[in-house]
Image: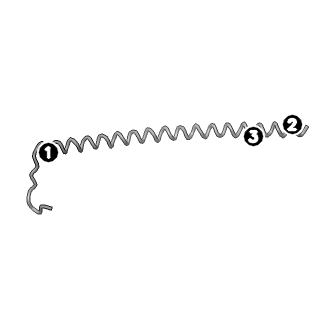
């Protein structure tokens, strides 16, 4: 803490710091976009897996029905 004294920074150091901050912001935005895409893909995959599970359940029900009908005869 310097109190009321001004802080002097070399212009090139300031520019470097600002450049690094901008780069970090870009990387954070890119990470956000990537996470959003991954989330969308995951939701799509989950939906497809649910559909597959529904189809398997329907097939199992049909097999049980056929099996039941065969043993009734």
What crowding class fits label 3: few (fewer than 14 Cα within 10 Å), some (14-19), or many (20 or more)?
A: few
Give residue 55's quadrant in the image. top right
Task: Tell me: 23 left or right of 30.
Answer: left
Q: Of callouts 1 and 3, which one flags the residue occurring earlier in the amino acid sequence?
A: 1
Residue at x 12%, y 42% (from the top left corner): 12
SS for dot 1: helix
Q: Of callouts 2 and 3, which one flags the residue occurring earlier in the amino acid sequence?
A: 3
Checking the image for residue 2, the label placed there is none
Residue at x 50%, y 40% (from the top left corner): 42
Checking the image for residue 70, the label placed there is 2
Residue at x 84%, y 40% (from the top left corner): 68
SS for dot 2: helix
Checking the image for residue 61, the label placed there is 3
What crowding class fits label 2: few (fewer than 14 Cα within 10 Å), some (14-19), or many (20 or more)?
A: few
Task: Tell me: 29 left or right of 54.
Answer: left
- Viewer-nearest of labels 2 and 1? 1
Position of residue 29 measured from the top left corner of the image (x, y, whole percent)? 33, 41
In contact (CB < 8 Å): disc 2 and disc 1 = no
Find disc 1 in the rendering and name its residue.
13
Task: Tell me: 23 left or right of 48.
Answer: left
Question: Which quarter of the rendered picture does the N terminus lie within?
Answer: bottom left
Residues at marks 2 and 3, CA–CA distance in whole angstroms: 14 Å
SS for dot 3: helix
Q: Of callouts 2 and 1, which one flags the residue occurring earlier in the amino acid sequence?
A: 1
Residues at marks 1 and 3, CA–CA distance in whole angstroms: 71 Å
């Amino acid at each position: 803490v310097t109190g009321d004294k001004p802080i002097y920074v070399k212009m090139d150091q300031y520019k470097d710091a600002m450049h690094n901050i901008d780069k970090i912001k870009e990387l954070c935005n890119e990470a956000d976009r990537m996470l959003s895409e991954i989330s969308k893909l995951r939701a799509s995959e989950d939906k497809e897996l649910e559909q597959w599970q529904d189809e398997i359940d329907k097939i199992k029900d049909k097999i049980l029905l056929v099996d039941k009908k065969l043993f009734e005869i």
